[in-house]
Amino acid sequence: MESLRSPATRKDPLGLHNRKVVAAKVLIDVLRRYPATRRIAQAALPIGDTARLLNRAVGGAQLERAPLHAGDCEGVGIYVALESGVYRYDRYTCLLYMMSALDIRPQLALLDGLPPAPLNLLYVGRTAAGEPGREESTAVLSSLNTAALCEEVAQYCAGVGLVAVARGWLERSLLASAIGLPQDEYLLLVQSVGYPGRGAA
């Protein structure tokens, strides 16, 4: 008979390994429930449409927060890739801050072969560097909140006649260098947004 061990002596007392699996399944489930067409027109979105999408779908999303933590407590950051460059989106001020003047949209299509989309949301996870014991829980939080943001964006796009495509096949190191991601951030997923392309369902 297996002996019982106290939570303090177990290798994974909080079940973080299982929670990481759950977080990954949640993200996959969201993407499957919104199987948007892969066809996106390259026509630019009006600035007003872009602002409304960011402010309502991204800025207005209700995300999980880490308790009793004074710093970043959502575990996820959002960058916006447009023809004019790459910007960091602040969910609280609803402002864009330029990170790079490079147009990285062609680099997003290196592995999946899709044409560049006018608007791309880059979701980045944030590590818990310098905070022992929080690495795995922060990874879980990043995955769950990325899933929540993807769902909000997909729902918003479906309601206003836009399409949203999730892109997971990415040259992450190349993109991180082009954007200038800090060392405590890593690229999780890209969600491309635009008008339906020709032949889209």
Image (tube, helix red, strand yellow):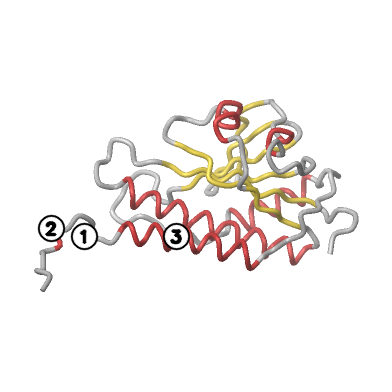
Looking at the rendered image, the quarter that the N terminus falls into is bottom left
The residue drawn where x is 52% and y is 54% is: 146
Q: Which mark is residue 8?
A: 2
Q: Position of residue 179 (x, y in %)?
A: 59, 30
Q: Position of residue 36 (x, y in %)?
A: 73, 61
Q: Which mark is residue 131?
A: none
Q: Circle 3 — which element?
A: helix
Q: Is residue 101 left or right of residue 6?
A: right
The residue drawn where x is 76% and y is 34% is: 83
Check disc 2: other Cα within 10 Å, few if <14, some if 14-19, many if 20+. Answer: few
Q: Is residue 115 left or right of residue 12?
A: right
Amino acid type indicated by mark 1: Pro
Amino acid type indicated by mark 3: Ala
Q: Which mark is residue 13?
A: 1
Mark toward the start of the polypeptide (1 vs 3): 1
Q: Is residue 29 left or right of residue 141?
A: right
- Of residue 21 and residue 81, the one placed in the foreground of this image is 21
Q: Circle 1 — which element?
A: loop
The residue drawn where x is 65% and y is 58% is: 153
